[in-house]
Image: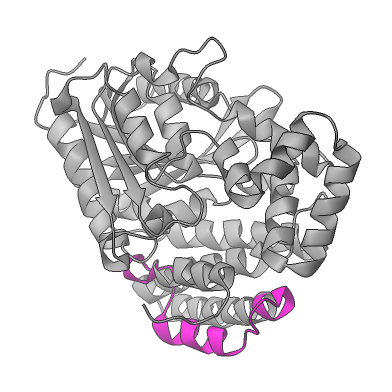
Amino acid sequence: MHRFFKSEFFNFEFLRILSTAPYGGCEIGEALHAVSQIRDGDPESWSKAWDEARVFAEETAESAQRVGDKHGARAAFLRASNYARASQYMLGSPMSARDPRIISRLESSRELFRKGVSLLEGAIAYPLTIPFEKAGLPAYLYIPNSISAPCPLVVSLTGGDSTQEEIFLACTSAGLARGFALLTFDGPGQGILLKRDRLPLVAAYEEVLSVVLNHIEKIVAGSRHKIDLGRVAVVGHSLGAYFALRSAADPRIKACVAIDPPYNMWTVVTSRLPGWFLKIWEAGYLTDTMFDCLIHVLSVLNFQTKWEAEHLRAICGTESSAKAFKNLKNFSFLLADGNQYLDKIQCPVLVSGAAKSFYFEVHTNTEKIYKALGSLDVAKRNIWIAEGVEMGGLQAKIGAFELSNHRIFSFIDAHLRSRADLV
């Protein structure tokens, strides 16, 4: 595979942006110009290059809007939104860096996206705020214009470092094109709620989705929206796939697609740190303060380690790397009593893995999840292991969104639209 950067991190994140091109998330020429301005491992050059791309795309959008080119304006606003998201991505977390560009650029991404989807053709995007505890979850409900009868709803979840605006470009728009209604939202610890409000992730994500579905039920009941809430599916990528599987235990979910999920987030720690080191730390011979100092030293030596440690502390809501790492044990399908959370799922499930993932190894994650779904009939559980990049071999199917979306929505279609009597 061709590489744009030597470092795995920068190369992967650039491919992540490039992968959205088929759905309007970037223009190839704009992306190639940006990558030519970026120094490998340098977050400032990354930030500057994508901010300049955002300015160019935003100016293009405004120019198109002035002459009545609705299509050109929509496309450029969506690209500008994605570039704005990318421009703040490498700047760190608000807990550690407190860089004012982080929040301002993420807010800019949201506003540019709002302008873009307000110009959608063939669908209407309804912005929502869903009450959840003390927060309001920003959301969008997308409904196709062309439907004559109530259609299934697909809830497209964000993950550990994505936003609902990015998810639209990676998956949601593909579902709209296939005639599904789509719902996206940023939950606690995601998107603007992480960067601006500093809300941590919720491991028991089924609690979040339950509140969200309750709210959507009220909206649909009091409107003319043609949505069949007896046919709801959930889809997520990477950590979002973990959340999708947690959410699938809700009996209102009739199909679930989990693209490259972890079985237990603690495996990320065990893949990063030596076993002997973890043993002496967990035994108490190495204090949490000493652990934090070590992570600080490693962060100075390697930017990817720095970024991952900062982001992990932010999504876990702590200043301590030790506490953040330990918190990952809460993100597991193995319950404290030894039972499997996945036994609660009754709906059809498609789970995938990525052979070239540098986060979630197939054998200890995808295959383990598939096996844990053993209470489901074989016809209701499908597994897809992708090898090459073109086949979806990178984490979250980066570089293969067209293939991934074909598989996602074909699976959902087979289990929802062919059975109109689902309740």
Occupied quadrant, residue 129: top right
Residue visible at 73% across and 77% down? Answer: 44
Q: Vertically, is 79 above or below 284?
A: below
Question: Is residue 61 part of the magenta span, yes or no?
Answer: no
Q: Is residue 253 above or below residue 185?
A: above
Give the quadrant of the N terminus. Answer: bottom left
- Relative side of 97 to 36, left or right: right
Residue 199 seen in the current view:
no
Task: Identify which residue is drawn at 65% across, 42% down.
Answer: 275
Percent from the top left, x then y, of residue 422? Answer: 17, 18
Q: Is residue 38 magenta?
A: yes
Instruction: Indicate the quadrant where residue 387 lies.
Output: bottom left
**Chain part drawn in magenta:** 20-46
With 208 as the anchor, is 245 left or right in this view? left
Task: Between residue 68 and residue 9, name the one nearer to us.
Answer: 9
Q: x, y percentage for residue 139?
A: 51, 40
Residue 175 point in image, percent of width and height:
28, 48
Residue 19's x, y, as percent? 39, 68
Residue drawn at x 32%, y 66% is: 389
Q: Residue at x 46, y 75 (%)?
A: 65
Q: How is the image coloured?
A: one colour
Q: Is residue 285 above or below residue 110?
A: above
Q: Nearer the viewer, residue 303 or 283?
A: 283
